[in-house]
Image: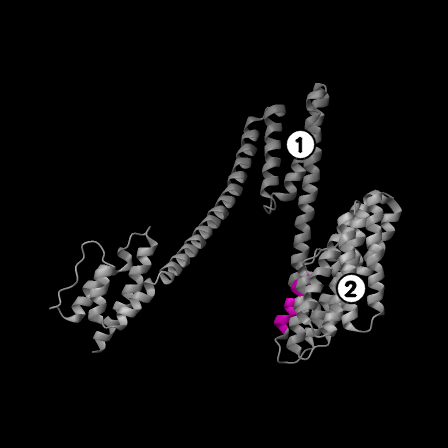
Amino acid sequence: MSKASSISEQHRQSGNAHFKSAKASSRVADKRRHLWSALDCYKLGLETATSARDRGLCRKNSGVAHKELCLAEWTNQQRSRAWDHLHSSLACFSEAWRQATLWTKSAGSEGERWRQRFVQQFPEDLLDMYSLTLNLETDQALVDNLARVCNVIGRYSFSNTEYLEVVAGVFIDYANRLLHLSVSLDKKLNYGLAYSYIAKMPFPIQEAERVLSRNATDDAFDCLHSELETLREDQRIQEAVFHSRVELERGKAFCQNLGENSATQMTDEALLAMDHLRAALNLISEDGIDIVLEAEICSDIGSLYLNVFNAENSAEKFFKRCIQLILCHLTNWFAAAERGLRILQERGAKRHDAELRKVLESDGTLADIKTNYDRGIEHFLEHIYKVYSIGDNKLPDADLPLRKRLMVALSHYHPDKADKQDRRQYYLREEITKYLNVRFEQTKVG
């Protein structure tokens, strides 16, 4: 064991000692203090760790400590803190899983045993955290908290069967509870929501159906019908892309050997390459599953027709198809990028406008306009033409009726006449015409 690894081990053991003290404590304050001390030790162990094993152990132990803090805070009615620890616990478990996988690759049977122990512990801890939500005051509170748990869990995907079964069980329990809640809740909506979580989980459709058949009712299968169909279709598409890539790689392998063999062998290799490329294309071409992959296959087939079989018409057909697919793909990218830039420009303009309005407010302009309007319309007209004059516009003749003078002033200060690049002038005009319009409407009533 290296010196750094020994130091990490020491910090972790110190953390374990604090953790044991926390488990033995009956007072929440003592439990919380020991658990935070344990987390500090695990953090030091993580900082000094030099191997995936040490990092994984520190992360796993941190996850367990956060889980215990979650339970303690929830028991102590500190719900907000409990949720923070729930998030932290799952994040630590997620990273620990990754480190365990890395260690298993290099540590053989010892690493696999440790990973299996972790695999068995995580579902138990997950169920502990889930059970926190099941004794709440109202049906609506139960629904809200169950939904929150499912949202948190849905962020983490582990491929282990035990984990997937626990998660599926949580979602099924959520749906069944929703089904039997009081009539004040919309059962159909919430039941469909619960099963939409199952549809998002990354486990195979066969596994989902097996777990459902063991836990769910006939009503559950009826509600889940469309979600199961979606899962089946997603799996079909993933399998089609996977097998297409396999066939493509086989075809490319034969293409690479073409220049190294005799003429007879070269023809055989070319025919085999074409068979694999055609198989790859057939797997994905009908549904337009993967445009980029389809374009690559068409390019390889076109090159084979041109350079080996000298079939120019066929080569042209596949080259054109390749270009068509790529242009379609680029068009989608271009449209998405164009929309994104437009949104960014609009957001930037809104931020700039908000800043300008703050400037007008902070430098007293808005207050000045309001104060002088409150002193009377005659004074207001004289003030704006004196302080905020625009071009050669003159104060309307005092001999004209007030309604006519207001119409003239509105035409002078209308925001649409401002320079589109001068946003300060635009908002200044907008503020002035706001008050002019108020007085103009009053003349209609009079």
Query: Which numbered disc, 2 or 1, marks the residue that appears first in the sequence?
Result: 2
Which colour scheme appears in the figure?
one colour
Query: In the rendered image, is residue 27 in sight?
Result: yes
Q: Mark 1, residues whose alpha carbon is within 10 Å: few (<14), some, or many (≥20)?
A: many
> How many numbered dots are placed on residues in this image?
2
**Residue 148 location (% of width, % of height):** 66, 67
Question: In this rendering, does residue 100 appear at all?
Answer: no
The amino acid type of the residue labelled 1 equals Met
The residue tagged 2 is 35
- Marks 2/1: CA–CA distance: 64 Å
In the image, which is nearer the foreground, mark 2 or mark 1?
2
The percent position of residue 175, horizontal first and vertical second, equals 69, 70
Q: Secondary structure at mark 1?
A: helix
Position of residue 401 in the picture relative to residue 229 (left or right): left
Which residue is nearer to you in this view: 335 or 424?
A: 424
- Name which residue lies at 57% across and 29% down: 315
Q: Label 2 is placed on what type of residue? A: Leu
Q: Residue furthest left?
A: 399
Write down the region rendered in magenta: 188-198
Q: Nearer the viewer, residue 35 or 146?
A: 35
Disc assigned to residue 274:
1
